[in-house]
Image: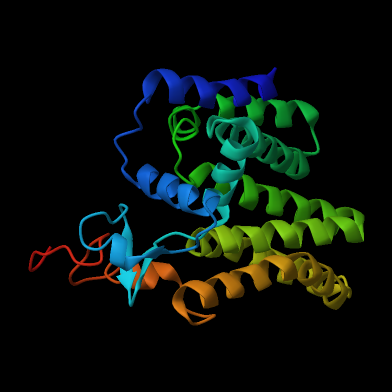
Amino acid sequence: LVVLLAAAAPVLVAGRLFPSGSPDRDEAAYLSQANALRAGHLTLPAASHDPFFLPFLSGVDGDRVVFKYQPAWPAVIAASEALTGTPKTALALTGVASTLAVAALAFEVTLRRRAALAAGFVFATSPWFLIQSGTYLAYPVSTALLCGATALVVRAARTGVAGLWVAAGACMGLGVLHRPFDAVLGLAPLGVWFLVTRWRSGSIRRDVGWLSLGAAPFALLFFAYNRAVTGSMFTLAFSLVGPHDRFGFGPRSSLADPGEPGF
């Protein structure tokens, strides 16, 4: 019942509450990037888009229009529309994945099935989930990946199963590919816990090796995408499109050029 609720709620919210999209315009950025990926393009030609037809939250780098966000979630949206005829399938899958990840983490922490079911139900009926899951924003995907990675690490540490370490590494790698900053926030505490607990076990090198094996394919995709889009493996498109979109003091903007001094 919880899984059915988690699958149905995003589709209903998207169709009934946000039929033309939510007030958060970042949705348009993800959907535009998904459309480009469906057409086989990582970037768009600046000659036919700049300055009048730039997708929201995109920027111009030389002769190319570059999308601000990493490609994982837009690729899921594009695949959903290509395979099922609607991007809403991606919302349903993400709703189920994030709810199951929260439930799995609750189970690994408590080892109680009722606690896991309660956590999944509370999550799937929370205002945050009901609103966010009905949009094409990327935060529920981060929730699924980071909670899933944490649950897998805790279980792998308890059972010692190599496949669980590999799966945890894959979730971590995909999380970094998806939204690097979210991954840093979510995985830093897990990394501290891992080092403190596994150092005493004497198997930390083996565990890190399995984690690295799972993360390696997504690390390669991460660097390859950066190289293809920005020309450098270590430069994110985010830094080209929104150089002022960061923490701290000084000029701040989500757009490459707000056009206003002190914006």
Percent x, y for residue 96? 65, 32
Percent x, y for residue 15? 44, 21
The mark total stands at 0
Q: Quadrant of the N terminus?
A: top right
Residue found at the far left of this picture: 261
On screen, residue 7 above or below 27: above
Residue 46 visible in rendering: yes
In this view, the residue in front, 162 or 44, is 44
Name the side, left or right, on which 13 lies relative to 154: left
The residue positioned 58% from the left and 65% from the top of the image is 188
In this view, the residue in front, 44 or 114, is 44
Residue 246 visible in rendering: no
On screen, residue 189 above or below 133: below
Percent x, y for residue 218? 68, 65
Name the side, left or right, on which 48 lies relative to 102: left
Quadrant of res 246 = bottom left
The residue positioned 55% from the left and 43% from the top of the image is 77
Percent x, y for residue 144? 62, 45
Q: Quadrant of the C terminus?
A: bottom left
Quadrant of res 98 = top right
On screen, residue 64 above or below 54: below
Quadrant of res 24 = top left
The residue positioned 76% from the left and 38% from the top of the image is 107
Name the side, left or right, on which 39 lies relative to 239: right
